[in-house]
Image (cartoon, helix red, strand yellow):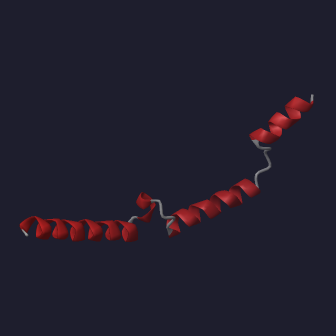
């Protein structure tokens, strides 16, 4: 009976830690948080306004020559 109680308490504690990390540090768990979504949007904006061709576009023009 002692081992069942000990394992149950351990399970509850680990589950609570897992939930706390998921809420406060979602990026650590592979969950895209608000901060990550903001960074993704900023990167999309900068790449959309870039005047430089991408590496794949340069490779296509080089192969055409």
Which picture quadrant has residue 64?
A: top right
Q: Residue at 61% across / 60% down in the picture?
A: 40
Using the image as rendered, state which of residue 59 and residue 41 is in the foreground.
59
Image coords of residue 23 (percent x, y): 39, 71
Residue furthest out toward the front: 1
Q: Residue at 81% across / 34% down in the picture?
A: 59
Quarter the C terminus occupies: top right
Image coords of residue 38 (percent x, y): 57, 66
Q: Residue at 39% across / 64% down in the picture?
A: 25
Which picture quadrant has residue 41?
A: bottom right
Image coords of residue 4 (percent x, y): 13, 68
Q: Residue at 80% across / 49% down in the picture?
A: 51
Report the number of discs: 0
Using the image as rendered, state which of residue 33 and residue 12 is in the foreground.
12
Residue furthest out toward the right: 65
Residue furthest out toward the top: 65
Q: Give above or below for 1 relative to 64.
A: below
Image coords of residue 43 (percent x, y): 64, 57
Using the image as rendered, state which of residue 65 and residue 13 is in the foreground.
13
Which picture quadrant has residue 9?
A: bottom left
Quarter the N terminus occupies: bottom left
Q: Give above or below for 65 relative to 32.
A: above
Using the image as rendered, state which of residue 54 and residue 16 is in the foreground.
16
Left or right of residue 37, residue 64 in this image: right
Q: Give above or below for 62 relative to 26.
A: above
């Amino acid at each position: 009976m002692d081992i069942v109680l000990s394992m149950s308490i351990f399970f509850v504690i680990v589950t609570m830690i897992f939930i706390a990390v998921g809420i406060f540090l979602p990026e650590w768990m592979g969950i895209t948080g608000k901060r990550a979504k903001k960074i993704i949007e900023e990167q999309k904006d900068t790449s959309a306004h870039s005047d430089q061709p991408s590496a794949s576009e340069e490779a296509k023009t080089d192969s055409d020559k």
